[in-house]
Image (cartoon, helix red, strand yellow):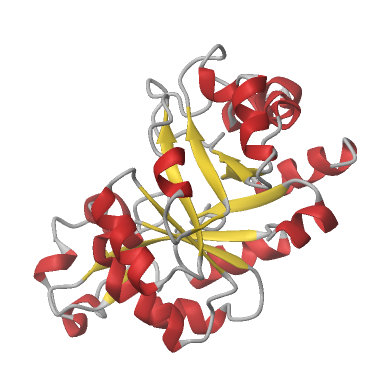
Amino acid sequence: MECLKKEKGILIAAHRGVAGGNIPCNTLPAFEAALRQGADILETDIACSGSGDLLAFHPGKEKQHLGVNVHLEQMTLEEISALRYINVDLDPTDYGILTLDAFLETFKNRCLINLDHGWEDMKGTIEAVRRHGMEDQILLKTPAKEKYWAIIEELAPDMMFMPIIKEEDNVTELLESRNINYVGAELVFAKDDSYLVSEEYIQSHKAQGRLLWCNPLVYYYKSQLTGGHNDDIAVSGDPEYGWGWLMDKGFDILQTDWIMPLRHFADSRGK
């Protein structure tokens, strides 16, 4: 991962691919579009079916993305295969839900991959990665909980790992003492003066060769992930405040819904 950083500068993570028009998120065309627009990392979510299958789908988003009140964890894979995503006009598309196996095999040897919500079935996620021989491509992330780290330490000490750190860092010292490949951290902060974006804290990670991930994407405008420096501001006229501030702070990976504009902006800054 560090080699790629040195080669490309800022790394761009595509949040569920590139969705828009008739192409929903977490579908093959969304991921292909993201790579064509310059993404370095594909981020996808993992949900579980009732029959134990892993799916490239955000848990709990069935109504928003499928337009029906269903719960995938209560359905078999056969039942799920009949479901179709809806587009931005809430009309049905011909795109079904990807299995994690299908997603992994499609993007093997093509890019880095972040498996978000892999903690829904940590053991199954790790087994799927090994089944496809993709250990060097995968970036695992989890909330700051011991139960997830124990599984990673036992089953995947070789895979790249980032904890999700929100406002306070109570995990780095613990992780440094464990047999975990601690390559970086996802930082979530609500205000510009958060300790997580202080020079002291940023440099403490840099000194250990770790990469720092942030999320300028906007889930919900009342819940800031990057202190107000976000995609909405960047694409509506102020990319320096939206993205440049984060780059200047020292973030190495920006997860976005706007791949091409961010790639153009990063390139214009020599990043």
Q: Nearer the viewer, residue 171 or 29?
A: 171
Rendered residue at 53%/25% (across/down): 196
Total residue callouts = 0
The percent coordinates of residue 43 (x first, y second) are: 51, 58
Q: Nearer the viewer, residue 83 or 162?
A: 162
In the rendered image, the quadrant that contains the C terminus is top right
Residue 64, image x, y percentages:
28, 49
Residue 126 at least partly seen: yes
Q: Residue furthest left?
A: 74
Residue at image point 63% right, 63% down = 33
What x and y, as percent, mark residue 226? 53, 26
Whether residue 81 is situated above or below residue 240 in the rendered picture: below
68 or 34, nearer to the observer: 34
17 displayed left or right of 199 = left
Identify the residue at the far top of this view. Answer: 193
Looking at the image, can residue 92 be seen? no
| Quarter placement of the N terminus | bottom right
Residue 269 appears at what percent x and percent y? Answer: 87, 35
The answer to whether 145 is drawn above or below residue 99 in the figure is above
Q: Is residue 99 above or below residue 141?
A: below
Identified at 26% across, 80% down, the residue is 81
Residue 136, quarter of picture: bottom right
